[in-house]
Amino acid sequence: MNNTVLVLSAASAIVAGTPILLAAVGELVAERSGVMNLGVEGMMLVGGVIAFWAGVHTGSLALALVAGGLAGALLACVHAVLAVSLRVNQTVSGLSLVIVGSGLSAFLGSAGDKPLLETKNGVNIHAFFPKAVRDLPIVGPIVFGHDLVVYISWAIVASAAYVLYRTSAGLSLRAIGEDPAAADAAGLNVVRTRYLATAIGGFGAGMGGAYLTLAVLGTWQTGLTAGVGWIAVALVILAGWRPWLALIGAYAFGALRGLGFTLQIAQISIPADFLNMTPFIAAYVVVIVVSASPSRSRRVAAPAALAQPYSRESR
Amino acid sequence: VNGLPANPFVVTPRARPSAAVRLGVPFGALLVALGLGMVVLLAFGDDPLKAYRTMFESSLQGWRPFTRTLTYATPLILTGLAAAVAFRMKVYNIGAEGQLFVGAIAASGLALALPPDLPRVLMISVVILGGAVAGAIWAQLAAIPKALFGTDEIITTLMLNFVALGLMNYLIQGSRSFWRNPTHPVPQGKEIPKSAQLPILYERLHAGFLVAVAVAVALWLLVRLTTWGFRLKVIGDSRRAALYAGISVGAMTIGVMAVSGAIAGMAGAIEVSAVTKGLQPKALAIQLGYTGIIIAAVARLNALGVVPVAVLLAAITVSGSSLQSIGVASELVVLLQGLIFLSVTAGEFFVTNRVRLASSRQAVRSQRELGAPPHVDETPVATAVSAKPASGESLALRSPTMGSAR
């Protein structure tokens, strides 16, 4: 029963969706504070190469993930300096982060005497639960069959949802994303909160890149994200800036990325080039549908001050 | 005042940045980026001066390298223009990459389908125009949803890039299509007839370079002299003002995306006609579209500025292969491009604002310039004046309208 197409596809969708999920939840937190960071793709790449390097040198998955996350957060802080302090256009700043990230990761991956490009993965990733649990029908592979990072990502989603909606810190963060002037007048520190939220976003993207490199692909390749970061940016909009919806959406995109595998088992042949396109076509269509839908809830969901620089003197 | 932390700098907005500032700041940012690149090289134990000298010699010294650089700059001029014109209206078309691919598909298709004995001028004109039309149509896939529903064009244009790339790969690697060379064992595009190939001007330079420069001049005039260009700038500076003035923002969105997509499609057509001589996915998918965004930013969205900046970025890119001969990873050039983009973006703050170290007299004077009353004596001057944004609407690279678009 556990070897049926549906069960295997669902399990692989979760693995393929986890990098998207980690990056999207991070970006969601940043955007909730009003900072739009389009540099997810670049932060994922830098997170991925640093995590791979850390994995080769330490052999520890935890250290590699943290290293990847910190690298992403560091790059995000560059965006924060530009977007929050220098108040330059966040779209342009985010795009520049993508190029810096892809250049830096490509250089780090191929420089030196023993380039990471030709190095084997130093991290051993294994299932978290014992075999008896993993062999349970259906839920075994889908729910209990994964490595620790998948469960960490669930905890991150749960805590993001809790902090954003159930704590005063989350309320402050959302207030700053909706109306920074009012939040400032109420005594909240807009600049510090936005820096922090942007760094958290970068940490999520870096971890996502780390997981993609270490667990999903298992090797470092130049430009290995191939659009995953952009899917995460789109997912934040599609999920209406809500963490649990981002989880569902991430696994849907994960399923699309694994579509070739599913169809292969089901013996349906579609050219590989078209299969590779499907997540991007899906994101394209859904972004249009979401923006065309007349429902009020979508408009409410987008932080009102998203991508707008805040300066005390101009309020 | 306001309980702001002590700020050692006096920041005052520039109402109208002078030409020296508009040229000087990006140039300074360029030097900063090269400096950061030196730090990275030193960290990896490489000799930065030797690396930069090698890059210069391999791309700009002598006619052969220089004409090679100009040839490489040709599509970059066009993708830079494609980004610049759209960004000027704050329509963030980052789909030049995909529009270029679609232009290349259409151009190579036309070149292969038309009778090869057509007069060369006619053939080349049809091929380039065909590429432009295809790019313009492809751009509408993002423009129409944007005009109708306000759909975020950053996401849609980017997603369409991957679709266009997949399409191009499918035509050559994934199928035995009309575009593919049926005799060659390795998948590659069929060679287009001689009559569809742009002539060589000198050494490695082809006539497409002149086309690209002509497009730059035409676009500069279009934005500067026509009503269309005036509307474009009004929307870019203040969407609200444009709406009050009765400018149809939706129609302008469709129009600017058509122009932008056409220029990017033309880049693909010229690459096919003069360089790859067929639909060659590997030779076309070299980030020309994304590099165009950097070029537009460094040129501060000025169409004439795009030309020299594209040549500079082309010089950096073509010199990548020469770096390997001295043991430096060729990926350095991508890193340098990113650093240039980043420092120029940061530099935008210094174009729109004047930053000085606070000495008390200057601070008081700068306050007077702003029309604000000078400080009373008990206020420490350095804490009193802090960042005030420039008239944020004055520059397209500042103060986005993204919030309303999403």
Image (cartoon, coloured by chain):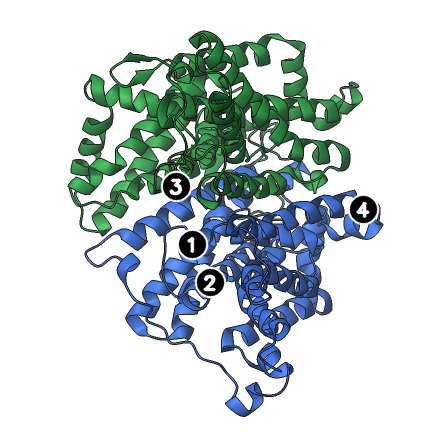
Label 4 chain ID: A
Which mark is drawn over residue A293? 4
Measuring from the top left, give residue A70's x and y in whole percent. 43, 62
Q: Which residue is mark 3?
A: B187
Q: Residue at x 40, y 74 (%)?
A: A61
Say which of marks 3 and 1 sits in front.
Answer: 3
Residue farthest toward the bottom in the current orientation of the protein: A132
Per the model, the C-alpha gap separating discs 4 and 3 is 43 Å
Q: Specify which label sits upstream in the sequence, 1 or 2.
A: 2
Q: Specify which label sits upstream in the sequence, 4 or 2.
A: 2
Q: Are marks 3 and 1 on the same chain?
A: no
For badge 2, the amino acid type reads Leu
Q: Are marks 4 and 3 on the same chain?
A: no
Q: Residue at x 66, y 34 (%)?
A: B141
Q: Is residue A28 left or right of residue B128?
A: right
Q: Are marks 1 and 2 in contact (CB under 8 Å)?
A: yes
Q: Nearer the viewer, residue B319 or B183?
A: B183
Label 3 chain ID: B
Q: Which quarter of the picture shows residue B142?
A: top right
Residue farthest toward the right in the current orientation of the protein: A295
Vertical order, B357 against A187 (above or below): above
Is the residue marked by circle 2 packed among few (<14), some (14-19), or many (20+) residues within 10 Å? many
Judging from the image, what secondary structure is the residue with disc 3 in? loop
Per the model, the C-alpha gap separating discs 2 and 3 is 30 Å
Measuring from the top left, give residue B206's x and y in whole percent. 34, 16
* Chain A, chosen colour in render: blue
Per the model, the C-alpha gap separating discs 4 and 2 is 33 Å
Q: Which residue is mark 1?
A: A224
